[in-house]
Image (cartoon, rainbow, N blue to C red):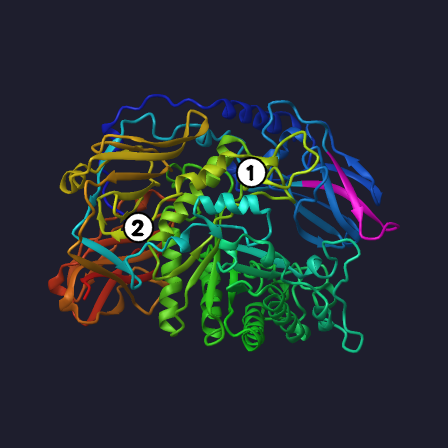
Amino acid sequence: MLASATCSMAQQTATPPTISKEGKKQKAIHDYLFDTFIKNRKTVYQGSADNRSLKELTVLEQIHQIRDGEEIELPAGTERIAILFRHFGFHGENLDRIKEVHVFPFSPDKAPPRSVQVKDFYRVQMPSISNNDQPPQRMKIRFLMKQKDAACRIDDLVFYAQNAISPEFDTIPYRDLGSEFPRERVEVHVDTDHELSIGGTSDLQRHRWFRMHETSGVVDQSFETWASEHNFLPGRGAFKFNPALTHGWKKDAETLQERKDKPGAADLTFFDRYDAGERQRRTIPLWKDTPFALCFNDWPEFMSVPLQGRGTPLVEHFDDAAELAAAYVADQIKDGGSTAAWWEVKNESSVASEWSHHDRKDADGWGLLSDFHNRVAAKVHASSPAVKVGGPSSAYMQLQAGNFKLYQNQARFIQETRGHLDFFSHHFYENALTLGAHERRGLGYSNYLLGRYEAILDMLRAEMHRVDNVLPILITETGSLQNGREPSDNWLRLYAWNAYLTKSMQRPDQIDMFVPFIFLHMSWNPNSGDAAFAPKPGLKRHVTIDDFEPTIVARYFDLWRDFDGRRLPVAFDRDYLDVVAIHDDKQVSLAVTNMGGRQIAVDLSGVASKIGATAARQTRLNYHQGDVVFEPEQAVDANAIPVDVNETTVIRLTLSRPLNPSGTLQMDRIYAAETAVATADKPTVFQVELEDPKTVQSAKLIIGIHRNGGINKPVKVSVNDTPITLDMGDANEFSEFFGSLDTALPMSILREQNQVTITSQEGATITSVQVVVHRTAN
């Protein structure tokens, strides 16, 4: 929602912000990188003039002949600046012979995930770096080869920034954003006379939203019990044929082999002896019948494109790969009594690093992707009819890229998989160094939490309706792409999880499951910031929850532990605010996310007075004075409940008696068929069909729009030849605007066939048009 701000910046007196202790430490590292370390080293910058930012840094340029177990020590100081980069890689020869690398001192016993491996290039993710005030030891890389007698040549080692690093130190992550201004009052109205029905129910359906990136039986039962006590369920995981079946996790275990009589196909008699149900049997009883999602990945090398695309099946072996997938699912049901309810065909297959056919000039990558999904779905459905199959488990959801070429690819996938798939799935992440989204709106912020997430979902939904392939969406990963466990690192991932969650909870008519990228613990990356528990130091074995200690991100589970009930309608006049209201017999609860640039004071005094609330209480998980702080539920003034910038908070009003809503408001979204329409400063007409418009009690027009440089001219709109004023909010302040503009519609102008005429400036693209209506439900 875009509306005029409550107070203008000019009306407020700012006090100088201060940066945290962490910020001062990070500034010292940043200054060391640019003032000292990069001297006489190769660098690659993005941008020009004042907008130049460091993308690549060659740390070492020296030829090494490497054999199994040998190490390369990196230059002094590398260990200090490593935290600023997302990946490292090296060029050379015969790098396809490498099995894995270990990174000292950050990951001496575990191999960080590999993202690219070909003969002349190898790239891996920078391991998580512990939060420690002591300077780390000298950094070195140990190489382990696939064959003990194999060797390779290393020519250099390069660090890659996930988000290019500006030579000017960025203070935004290390400040209490908006604290230099007075809080702005925002009144939130809750309609306690009606429940809100979306997608056919008023129930929040907690099981859709409160999940984690875990599946049944993977971690010790003590962790599962802890999560269950916090009312969280397993959500999604990945199944990698290689190495799970081709190498195995147990010593001397039988492994999946290629058929001798049919090269490229798997010998499926393997499943006559393999136990695929071990994890289902060892999970806690409560989770045995809990539906969750799994994702296929890393098909065996004998049926895959060599080295590229994380086990992308060769086209001539699509059917062999589909048969293997179906055989595994069927064997899991036979051995364990169940399998995942949803199976994604190939992880993040929208990008070439996961689906190598996208990189082939002689191939239609997206056409092959649709074809492969359809084949896998057909085989799985034939042997396990109750299992749902979908995809493409998309990464990089910047659908406006390439003049909306990425969107056209997604639209094509929706069309070409019609009648085959059961759901679509996507991933949304905030880039590194993107804390303070609103403050960055004119500085190149291009992620999803200022309206882009909703605008993209609306485009995809409109296309589903257009081609008559309306399927549920699963959000199977969300989070941040920032390494580290410093307070700012943890705050970025926590605020991203929370913001995506509150936005998703408002779309039960579209989203069947939401899974943040949070783990109970990560055996392969024990110090990851995405884990709720980290190993206790000094222990030789870490198995049960008593061998671990909670990290600050475990407070995500505490914040949401008891959020459940039936939906209530809400109304407010505020930009970049999300509110979900529910009630049960004891209380009215609200989840509030403030993505705007000012700290606010939420006023619930009106609803508190109306329902006779006996108390107002608040639970907070927030960034304050340099630390992520959890504040358990405590009493607050219903007239002024504090919500800081980027904060998601849970507020409860205690009831003296249960609510008794007299009716239900049913919300529906009706989309125009056209999407991604470039207006070229000329009137463009969209048609929206409304069933029985006389029954509509309220209606809102929502226009998705994109433009580089922001929207700096008014968007002219008429509905059925009636001019409509569209509030532009701060759309002109974005370096790239991709979001929604909305306005209420008079009931008197609505018809069954509604003509929406839009004129926007040159360079703008109307991404979708919809009318959201509320009716009294029967």
Q: Residue furthest left?
A: 748
First in sequence: mark 2 or mark 1?
1
Residue 156 lies in the magenta-colored region? yes
Q: Nearer the viewer, residue 690 or 225?
A: 225
Q: Residue furthest right?
A: 149
Q: Position of residue 647 (x, y in %)?
A: 37, 37
Q: Calculate the distance from the C-alpha at mark 2 to the C-alpha at mark 1.
A: 29 Å
Image position of 266 with respect to 204: above or below: below
Which secondary structure class fits the magenta region best?
Answer: strand
Quadrant assignment for the C terminus: bottom left
Residue located 46% across and 27% down the image: 627
Q: Is residue 626 left or right of residue 523?
A: left
Q: Position of residue 434 (x, y in %)?
A: 46, 39
Residue 250, quarter of the rendered image: bottom right
Verify whether residue 596 appears in magenta: no
Amino acid at pointer 1: Phe
Closer to the camera in the image, 358 or 213 = 213
Q: To which residue does mark 2 refer?
A: 565
User: Splitting the image into 4 quarters, where does residue 463 fall?
Assistant: bottom left
Q: Secondary structure beneath disc 2?
A: loop
**Which amino acid type is shown beneath numbered disc 2?**
Gly
Q: Residues within 10 Å of mark 1 (few under 14, many from 20)?
A: many
Q: Is residue 190 left or right of residue 504?
A: left
> Which element carries disc 1, helix, strand or loop?
strand
Q: Give the residues in magenta.
A: 140-158
601 to 686, vertically: above or below: above
Q: Which residue is mark 1?
A: 533
Dot 2: within a 10 Å radius of its alpha carbon, few (fewer than 14), some, or many (20 or more) residues? Answer: some
Q: Position of residue 441 (x, y in %)?
A: 38, 41
x and y, in percent, of residue 310 in the image: 66, 58
